[in-house]
Amino acid sequence: MLDKVTFLKELTRQIDKLPVGHCVDTRSYKRDRSVLFIRMDSRRIRIVENGFEQRDLVVNEGAELRKQIKRVSRVEFPRSHKIRLYNLGEFTEDEHCSMRRKKL
């Protein structure tokens, strides 16, 4: 779990280390909103929003990615002070569709 202050720096570090085809899942503290960051190839990242907005977009690394992370943080996690970060390993489309909120 990360503070929102360190979210951008830590998420970009995690994405830089991701192998092709793997993904990182970010969720709000309540786990009711999620954003997946999937490495498509060495320069492109796919962002799948599942929360306030339902979007699927592909961006390049660098300034464009940082800009989208800031936008996602502002839209999906507006009042969250803590954000959950999960490294999910290899991404498969059918697992993504069946992901549900974890019951405690």
Image: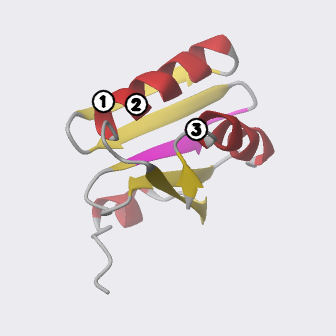
Three-letter code for the amino acid on which mark 1 is drawn: Val
**Label 3 – label 2 distance at C-alpha:** 14 Å
Q: Which residue is mark 2?
A: 72
Secondary structure under tag 3 reads loop
Magenta residues: mostly which secondary structure?
strand
Q: Residues within 10 Å of mark 1 (few under 14, many from 20)?
A: few
Horizontal and vertical percent for residue 93?
40, 55
Q: Which mark is residue 65?
A: none
What range of the chain is rendered magenta?
A: 35-41
Crowd tier of the residue under label 2, counting other residues whose Cα lies within 10 Å: few below 14, some 14–19, many 20 or above = some
Q: How is the image coloured?
A: secondary structure
Front-most of residues 71 and 78: 78
Q: Are marks 3 and 1 in contact (CB under 8 Å)?
A: no
Asked if residue 40 is among those painted magenta in the image, a careful observer would answer yes
Q: Is residue 65 left or right of residue 25?
A: right
Does label 3 or label 1 sit earlier along the sequence? 3
